[in-house]
Amino acid sequence: MKLFGKNDLQKKYPLVTGKDQEILRVVCDPVSKVTSEIKQFAADIQQLMRDYEWVWLAAPQIGINHRMAAITQRDLSNKDADGNTKWELLDEFVIINPKILAASETLKIDNEACLSLPGLKWDVARPHKITIQYLWVDGETHIHKATGFNARVILHEMDHLDGILFIDKLA
């Protein structure tokens, strides 16, 4: 709950903004082992993602040099009575040490924004379909397939883990 400004988690992990911030421009370190501290950080980053009312959040965006990101996957196929897209939540999870196993050659151009670059929105071309491998907070390896907006969310966050901002992808 947000009362009188930032909550305790937002104070502990302040949002890093600005294209020249060093933590946003480094390749993040892999997580060597899923410890109780990593599990707690995973819970914290998921809660922060909800607090910021965003659909994704990478560790470097809150000043942490870990290859981790909180992700939501949404069903955007439904419309409300006014024709607006309904953002129905399908899943929410944290990816640790993600790797792209496959990406479609078909690219889709769509508008992107970023919490770390407030006020900026640009069209970015990204693969329409991806398959990734990552560690789950239980320490087990998982495979995940995503398409469309959901693939875009994952790729945007994986870029953060490699020190890449969406503005770097503009033609």
Image (cartoon, rainbow, N blue to C red):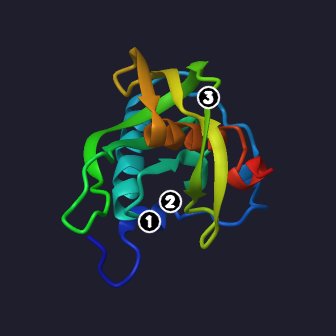
Q: Looking at the image, is 103 positioned above or below residue 127? A: above
User: Mark 3 or 2, which is nearer the eye?
Assistant: 3
Foreground residue among 104 and 54? 104
**Residue 57, image x and y in percent?**
49, 50
Q: Give me the C-alpha separation between circle 3 and circle 2.
A: 37 Å
Residue 19, percent across and down? 74, 61
Q: Which residue is mark 2?
A: 13
SS class of the residue under badge 2? loop
158 with respect to 8 (left or right): right
Q: Secondary structure at mark 1?
A: helix
Quarter of the image where the N terminus is located: bottom left
Horizontal relation, residue 48 to residue 112: left or right: left
Mark 3 lies on residue: 106
CA–CA distance in space, label 1 to label 2:
5 Å
Q: Nearer the viewer, residue 12 or 84?
A: 84
**Which numbered disc, 1 or 3, marks the residue closer to the eye?**
3
User: Mark 3 Cα within 10 Å, few/some/many (few <14, many 20+)?
Assistant: few
**Which residue is found at the position 64% from the left and 68% from the top?**
120
Say left or right for 29 vs 13: right
Q: Amino acid at mark 2?
A: Tyr
Q: State whether residue 25 appears in this view.
A: yes
Q: Are marks 1 and 2 in contact (CB under 8 Å)?
A: yes
Disc 3 element: loop
